[in-house]
Amino acid sequence: MKRSTAAAGLATVAVVAFTITAAPAQNFPSKPIKLIAPFPPGGSTDLLARVIGQKLTEAWGQQVVVENRGGAGGTIGVEVAAHAPPDGYTIVMGHIGTFGANPTLYPKLPYDPIKDFAPITLLAMVPNGLVVHPAMPVRTVKDLIAIARAKPGSVLYGSGGGGSAAHLAMVYFELLAKVNFTHIPYKGTGPAIYDLIAGQTSTMFTGMAALMPHVKSQKLRIIGVGTAKRLAVMPDVPTVAEAGVPGYEATQWYGILAPAATPRDIVMKLNAEMVRALRMQDVKERLAGDGVIPVGNTPEEFGAHIKSEITRWAPVVKASGARPE
């Protein structure tokens, strides 16, 4: 009899424990979610954050508020997310710069990209596009290389900051093409694009999601893409590798993470809804129009990707001589 009573007591405790553990996900979200985009508006990070934020808002009826917290190569916004309450109500857009290059770029990074975060999913791969101002007498990658070799340092290019994904993409281009440009760092991709359109700089190598509207409106001329194969959305544009820089390939990536101690069931609920959104036809068409390739994988796969990217970009960052701006 005592054994039965004890067993019943243990069963009750187990049920209560399960209920307490399951409760966060069952009730989540019960209030607005903050999605930190650690760069100013106008770049690929901001654009993707708003696409996925809108779909989460529609699915749950709770507002997903995109908060732009730019500065210091994205480290300010990411640090804010690292120290946020681990309840799923603060998540952050991570990308190749903040989680791939910054661990090598910053001697004292204010966050640990592995220990301080719970990966949710890799959202998308964003091909880099090499663009020039329409006034430049440049129609091909070889034209750009010829000008740079004729007058070393005369070609100005902008990026979202020293050591940013756009900066490293161009440094890699310079190394393989054996040319020297002059780097003009900005506080975000958006401002760098706007100055290129205004003619303050000559060229730029950054994510297609941010470039595509300006390419379509002919405010910028695209001469190459950084992928291994041509993009289906613009098949007439050659890859940089085939256009004169053999071996070149550099693609940006974007994903979403939560603070490290966020309950697993909430992480999985966020993952499931984001992956579902990426499979929606309107989202796929919206992203494809900007040359973006949706992914949507597991937290474990995204975590492994981050570790591999830190290893991959470490030698490129060191070779670039880049320093935090």
Image (spheres, rainbow, N blue to C red):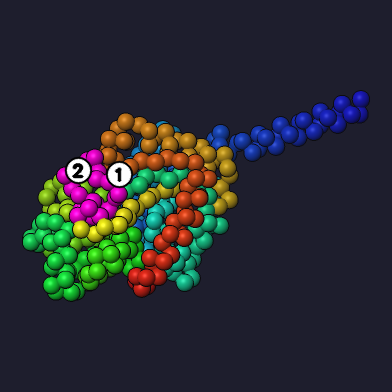
- At a point 89% along the width and 29% down the height, the residue shown is 3
Give how far across and how far down residue 66 sits, in percent. Answer: 37, 48
- Magenta-highlighted residues: 224-243
- At a point 14% along the width and 66% down the height, the residue shown is 146
Residue tagged 1 = 292
In this view, the residue in front, 126 or 227, is 227
* Residue at the extreme right: 1
- At a point 14% along the width and 56% down the height, the residue shown is 140
Give the amino acid at mark 1: Val
Inspect this view and state whether residue 169 appears. yes
Give how far across and how far down residue 82 sits, in percent. Answer: 50, 57
- At a point 23% along the width and 71% down the height, the residue shown is 180
34 displayed left or right of 268: left
Q: Which mark's residue is nearer the viewer, 1 or 2? A: 2
Q: CA distance from mark 1 to mark 2?
A: 12 Å
Instruction: Residue 43: give its label.
Output: none
Circle 1 SS class: loop
Residue tagged 2 = 234
